[in-house]
Image (spheres, coloured by chain):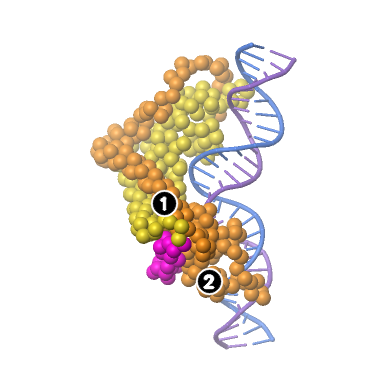
Chain colours: A orange, B yellow, C blue, D purple
Amino acid sequence: MNIGEASKATGISVKMLRYYEEIGLVRAALRSYSGYRVYSDKNIAMLRFVRRARDLGFQVKQIAALLDLWQDAGRASADVKSLAMDHVRELEQRRRELDEMIATLEHLAHHCHGDERPDCPILTGLGAEDEATQKPPRKKTSRRSFAVAG
Amino acid sequence: MNIGEASKATGISVKMLRYYEEIGLVRAALRSYSGYRVYSDKNIAMLRFVRRARDLGFQVKQIAALLDLWQDAGRASADVKSLAMDHVRELEQRRRELDEMIATLEHLAHHCHGDERPDCPILTGLGAEDEATQKPPRKKTSRRSFAVAG
DNA sequence: TGTGCACCTTCCCACCATTGGAGGGTCAAC
DNA sequence: GTTGACCCTCCAATGGTGGGAAGGTGCACA
């Protein structure tokens, strides 16, 4: 199997197959006499594993760890589970952030007429103060400054 | 106000303030005689708007569009709402993808003993065939991690 | 035997948003 | 006059991914 076939078989683009090899995520593929990469069924199985992990949002470093465990017959399933659950917690964190964004935006949009008039709570909401920006009141310490055109 | 103060006032790092200027998201700040950037209250308000939009997951290009609308007294609120709702739909799409990942991982992890034994449904699940592997390389959708304000 | 096309190779660039650091100037206080 | 906190610009790296140039290879068909 050459790289194009491997790409179709795994769902990983040709570019990424070369990239994964380059960064050492997977061992370099064997080469044909003329320098073409040659993939075995075993390679393909491993790459499919990689793609599935990728689809589940694992980063390349985590996939490397998973691959190590995959290939280690003496692994403890606890190690795998722990890695997976760490990742779940990270995904959940991201989801919470998304939820917050969506809720805020929907709230703002809900109060916006959405017609030809210019007044829009979305924009005023975005322009509004919020506690994150309320650091110090900072009464203009007036660092003297000669404005030069910009 | 110089850049450090502007950073504190807006919650945008000094690096990013310079970057936003460089890419033209915001107009270049005026300069003091010695070349320091000088920020007015109006600048600060605009930058706060930018930070809030960024916190809501808008990309820089979208923020540019929002800024244009913000400053256009004759805008139609429908345009703002449409932009916001497009973004909501994108966020919801990302959330669906996250949900799917989480559900799959939790399902796999649920069946894993998580002890010292090596057999682990998480790994076998990742190694398993699936119909997705029969398809051509996926077009990106979710892999953008949009770090939420730090 | 040539021609053509699809495929392969390496190498470099761009993207997005952000951080880090080097090397050097400025400001204010002590 | 030194010190330290600030500021400047420029360059590089991150993480995955795609785009494309410049050139070699494999194979089918005339």
From the viewer's perspective, tell me whether residue A103 is left or right of residue B27.
left
Q: Which one is nearer the viewer's eye here, A108 or D2?
A: D2
Residue A93 position within the rendered picture, expressed as x and y whole percent measured from the top left: 39, 44
Pointer 1 residue = A85
Pointer 2 residue = A42
Give the CA distance from mark 2 to mark 1.
27 Å
Disc 2 packing (10 Å; few <14; some 14–19; many ≥20): few
From the viewer's perspective, tell me whether residue A105 is left or right of residue C21.
left
Is residue A52 at all visible to an observer of this figure?
Answer: no
Three-letter code for the amino acid on which mark 1 is drawn: Met
Residue B72 position within the rendered picture, expressed as x and y whole percent measured from the top left: 37, 34
Task: Tell me which residue sits at (55%, 17%) in the image.
Answer: A143
Quadrant where the N terminus of chain A lies?
bottom right
Residue A49 position within the rendered picture, expressed as x and y whole percent measured from the top left: 47, 64
Residue B138 position within the rendered picture, expressed as x and y whole percent measured from the top left: 44, 62
Task: Tell me which residue sits at (40%, 35%) in the image.
Answer: B52
Chain holding disc 1: A
Task: Tell me which residue sits at (55%, 73%) in the image.
Answer: A40
Secondary structure of residue under mark 1: helix
Q: Which residues are magenta?
A: B118-141
Instruction: Specify whether residue B134 is painted magenta.
Output: yes
Identity of the residue furthest to the front in this view: B116
Quadrant where the C terminus of chain A lies?
top right
Q: Is residue B10 above or below residue B57?
A: above
Q: Is residue B89 above or below residue A32?
A: above
Secondary structure of residue under mark 2: helix
Disc 1 packing (10 Å; few <14; some 14–19; many ≥20): some
Q: Nearer the viewer, mark 2 or mark 1?
A: 1
Three-letter code for the amino acid on which mark 2 is drawn: Lys
Q: Is residue B40 above or below residue A91?
A: above
Residue A20 numbered mark, or none:
none
- Label 2 vs 1, first from the N-terminus: 2
